[in-house]
Amino acid sequence: MALDKNQIAKRIAKEVQDGYYVNLGIGIPTLVANYVRTDISVEFQSENGVLGMGPFPFEGEEDADIINAGKQTITTLPGASFFDSAFSFGMIRAQKVDLTILGAMEVAENGDIANWKIPGKMVKGMGGAMDLVASAENIIVAMMHVNKAGESKILKKCTLPLTGVGCVKKVVTELAVLEVTPKGFKLLERAPGVSVDEIIQATEAELIIEGDVPEMSI
């Protein structure tokens, strides 16, 4: 069966390694902090000026002054620090972030990402998206495989305005884990109970499939 958003975040949390500095984008990526192993040390960064984010607060324990870039209330871990956006983006542009986890509306087989604008719809701005994709060397995308109309968002070529070119390394959706290779998307894992054929049917881009594709371990 297809994964829900929390399960997508839980699978991506397995990509987080000890000692990493990690930036979490808006949407599904913010959930990743809830699922990182407790036996490793990880620093979560938000481009609005927070280093040392923890899981989301329990209901009734929120502090309206402590928020992430998506204006959601967050917790902070011991040793957390707060700073202005100039310092935060200096950290991003200097490539001090080891892993960036972003949401997306489309990802292309060459690693292009579109995640900031749909023409004709109002947007508040691109936020930190442009800086993150331009500076990060390891980008994992958390997204839904298809849109509400059932159309693939895993494409041969993005149709929406691009955020970054050739920058995505891996995509985790409700159906699959895909690696971006020089030859296109390679199917690494499939969601429990989801067949390879179902993933092929839901994907506009060509998939590289080698041998038996294992189920995700959530």
Image (tube, rainbow, N blue to C red):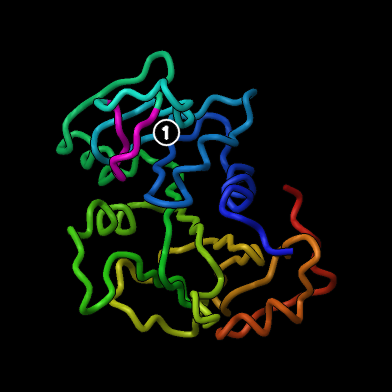
Up-down relation of residue 218 to residue 190 (above or below) = above
Residues in magenta, as a range:
66-74
Report how many numbered discs are placed on residues in the image. Answer: 1
Residue 105: image x %, image y %? 41, 69
Residue found 29% across the figure and 56% down from its top: 129
Q: Which residue, as the protein is rendered here, is positioned at the far top?
A: 78
Residue found 84% across the figure and 70% down from its top: 212
Classify the position of the N terminus by image quarter: bottom right
Residue found 59% across the figure and 34% down from its top: 36
Amino acid type at image mark 1: Phe
Up-down relation of residue 133 to residue 79 (above or below) = below
Examine the residues drawn in magenta and state their main secondary structure.
loop
Side (left or right) of 49 relative to 26: left
Residue 15: image x %, image y %? 60, 45
Read off the residue under disc 1. 44
Q: Is residue 153 magenta?
A: no
